[in-house]
Image: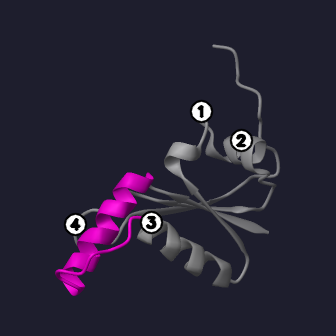
Amino acid sequence: MATFLILPPRELLEHAFREFANRILPGVTLPADVTEDFLERILPVQPDDTYAVHREDLPDGDNLASILCEAFGGESGDRIIEVGPPRSLSVASVRESIIPAFVSTVRAAR
């Protein structure tokens, strides 16, 4: 089973990461791609197949499970962990779900 880690937009993560780094390492210049480097180092050591997807990389649509199945190869039973935008010193909100056995990938007519 795979885990899809749905991350906030890159710009928000970058801002939060730099804000944190400035608090613990004041005056230190960070490379432009520090957030992506961090994610590339952290994700491979996760216990299962974990795929990070930034919000802005998702196609438009209402059903996240369907989008992940269509665009990223998600399957029934895969975990979805949605990480909310970082807020100051608070922990980001997290919402977990599982891709159900039947996911409609066709939009209903309205």
Instruction: Pick whichever of labels 1 and 3 is earlier in the sequence.
Output: 3
Please give the residue where the numbered disc 1 appears in the rendered image: 61
Please give the residue where the numbered disc 3 appears in the rendered image: 33
Residue 88's label in the rendered image is: 4
Q: Amino acid at mark 3?
A: Asp
Q: Give left or right: position of 70 versus 84.
A: right
- Is residue 87 a member of the stretch shown in magenta? no
Q: Residue at x 79, y 69 (%)?
A: 1
Residue 87's label in the rendered image is: none
User: Which quarter of the figure has residue 32?
Assistant: bottom left
Which label lies toward us, 3 or 2? 3
Contact between marks 3 and 2 (CB within 8 A): the answer is no
Contact between marks 3 and 4 (CB within 8 A): the answer is no
Decide whether the magenta segment is chiefly helix, strand or loop.
helix
Answer few, some or many: residues within 10 Å of disc 3's Cα (few below 14, many 20 plus, some between 14 and 19): few
Instruction: Pick whichever of labels 4 and 1 is earlier in the sequence.
Output: 1
User: From where the camera sits, is residue 46 visible?
Assistant: no
Residue toward you, 22 or 94: 22
Instruction: Pick whichever of labels 3 and 2 is earlier in the sequence.
Output: 3
Instruction: Pick whichever of labels 4 and 2 is earlier in the sequence.
Output: 2
- Give the Cα separation between the discs numbered 4 and 1: 29 Å
User: From where the camera sits, is residue 59 visible?
Assistant: yes
Q: Residue at x 71, y 25 (%)?
A: 107
Which label lies toward us, 3 or 4? 3
Contact between marks 1 and 2 (CB within 8 A): the answer is yes
Which label lies toward us, 1 or 3? 3
Q: Residue at x 17, y 82 (%)?
A: 26
- Give the Cα separation between the discs numbered 1 and 3: 29 Å
- Give the Cα separation between the discs numbered 3 and 2: 31 Å
Instruction: Pick whichever of labels 3 and 4 is earlier in the sequence.
Output: 3
